[in-house]
Amino acid sequence: QVQLAESGGGLVQPGGSLRLSCAASGRIFSPNAMGWYRQAPGKQRELVATITSDSSTNYADSVKGRFTISRDNAKNTVYLQMNSLKPDDTAVYYCNYVYLLATRDYWGQGTQVTVSS
């Protein structure tokens, strides 16, 4: 089992910044990928960004140039630095972990990000 603990959401004005963190604990194996997905009201959950244990990254086109994903493998923690936030970024952000040699993945409980003036 893997547990994911997210933090860092909140309310921010358009153009502002937030940093999300997600710490994984339990049975962590490599190679793996950790990442962030988001779900806005009435919409499907969508990829935001992922990073593998060897630091390969992938971003949704909508966040490229504004968001940066990083990780600390020693702490099994992934970060999402979000800059130039827009109202369209408002959503619940979920952390995800997947062991790349298995089929099961794990999800955090989600953290709310609201971008509004």
Image (cartoon, rainbow, N blue to C red):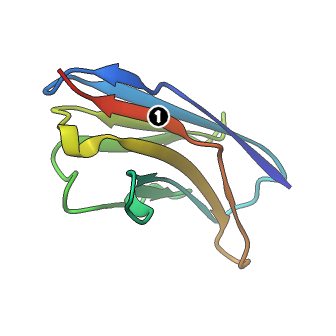
Which residue is drawn at the image coordinates 65% and 46% (left, top)? 108
Identify the secondary structure beneath mark 1.
strand
Q: Residues within 10 Å of mark 1 (few under 14, many from 20)?
A: some
Query: Which of the 4 quarters of the picture holds residue 6?
Result: top right
Number of callouts in the render?
Answer: 1
**Nearest to the observer: residue 1 or residue 86:** 86
Residue 91 image offset from top left, x and y in percent: 38, 44
Q: In this view, does 40 lie to the left or right of 65?
A: right
Q: Is residue 91 left or right of residue 17?
A: right
Vertical placement of 53 versus 88: above or below? below
Query: Which of the 4 quarters of the picture holds residue 59?
Result: bottom left
**Nearest to the observer: residue 48 or residue 39:** 39
Spot the residue most to the front: 42
Quarter of the image for the C terminus: give it: top left
Which residue is drawn at the image coordinates 53% and 48% (left, top)? 94
Vertical placement of 79 versus 50: above or below? above
The residue where tag 1 is placed is 112
Which residue is drawn at the image coordinates 64% and 65% (left, top)? 31
Residue 27 image offset from top left, x and y in percent: 84, 53
Could you tell me the amino acid type at mark 1? Answer: Gln
Which residue is drawn at the image coordinates 86% and 55% (left, top)? 1
Query: Which of the 4 quarters of the picture holds residue 66?
Result: top left
Residue 99 image offset from top left, x and y in percent: 69, 67
